[in-house]
Amino acid sequence: MTYQPDAIRTVQLSTLTLPLATAISDAKVFTGRQKPMTEVVFLLAEITTEQGFEGLGFSYSKRAGGPAQYAHAKEVAQAAVGEDPNDIAKLYTKLLWAGASVGRSGVATQALAAIDIALYDLKAKRAGLPLAKLLGAHRDSVRTYNTSGGFLNASIEEVKERASRSIAEGIGGIKIKVGLPDGATDLARVAAVREHIGPDVPLMVDANQQWDRTTALRMGRRLEQFDLDWIEEPLDAYDAEGHAALAAALDTPIATGEMLASVAEHERLIATRACDIIQPDAPRVGGITQFLRLLTLADQAGLDLAPHFAMEIHLHLAATYPREPWVEHFDWLDPLFNERLETKDGRMLVPDRPGLGVTFSEQARAWTTDTATFTQD
């Protein structure tokens, strides 16, 4: 059977706003740097080909940047029309150069991510394979931990109740937010959760970049008693040297990387040994093409992996990592999709459906605020 050439017929871009049921606060709110999060803005990409194949992808922005992503994607999307959808690396480079005057990170690459992810979804569907299988999986399930129940706007009783529910639902670990101006309150919350879930359930904390180097070291030492799986973002995301010093000083592993918006920025983390666990985000670094480049570098450096957010994408990518990874469970995006990811015995199962294994729901369509379609001239 010979390959039959195909071409992208349409690229449809949409922007939608997903409202959160409860305003969310992490340490950045309590230090006065941000307001509570009330919504997440998504950029959706849907691609169809001349042979009738379809793919979907998405990127997102919290608090700011969503309209900018949509605007940039609309400026470059036409460059993909007419191209072979299988040539994903070539297409990524073409789209990158179409908008290169605004750089190769941040909004510029986050806008491309939705298109890049849609192309991978399409390619896996063409092959009749889950995306993880197309890329080459090391496992059919990935350890998973819950974050969405551990925010600082929730009382400690609410956090404990949500932890119990998550464990009962087959989620393996619990992450809670720290980084309050009063470190004693942080320690009390961690102690309460550790006592509640017991010594054998993996527990992680996330300071969302709100400690300085001195505070991070002191808090890190005090947190060692709780046998944490990691301390996440104890310092500013770009303080690679500070993270490296902290990782060397503490027994508890250090995790960071979610706020970085390119492979180049992650390369500095890796080169300085700034973390034990790297946490890239495919929509933030430019999509799956760039994420796979980063995985190779991380594996060569001997780092563990725990991708940030967007479990619908990252489950597949984590399943391809040679070292046993984690994937972050968030239920915020559930209304956007008709399907649900399954958790069992502390792990998230790779779906057997082709591609990403999800389709956009009617609710996602209802929340859509604008759409633009690009076809052959």
Image (cartoon, helix red, strand yellow):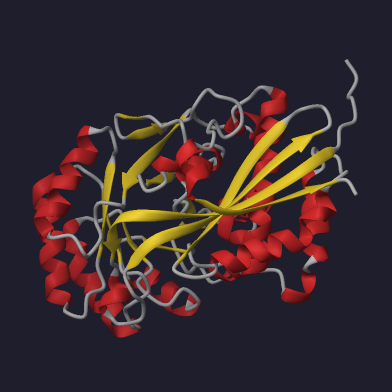
Write the residue at 50% across / 77% down: 238
Residue 287 in picture, x, y percent from top left: 64, 52
Going by the image, does 360 lie left or right of 72?
left
Residue 209 in picture, x, y percent from top left: 37, 74
| Residue lying at the far top of the rendered structure | 1
Image quadrant for the N terminus?
top right
Residue 266 in picture, x, y percent from top left: 58, 65
266 versus 283 height, above or below: below
Going by the image, does 68 lie left or right of 347?
right
**286 or 331, nearer to the observer:** 331
240 versus 80 height, above or below: below
**Number of numbered markers:** 0
Going by the image, does 26 lie left or right of 158?
right
Q: Is residue 323 visible?
A: no
Residue 35 in picture, x, y percent from top left: 34, 75
Write the residue at 29% across / 62% down: 24
**316 or 270, nearer to the observer:** 316
Write the residue at 49% across / 36% down: 361
Q: Which quadrant holds residue 128?
A: top right
129 versus 373 height, above or below: above
Write the residue at 88% across / 24% down: 3
Q: Is residue 2 visible?
A: yes
Q: Which quadrant holds residue 33?
A: bottom left
**125 or 1, nearer to the observer:** 125
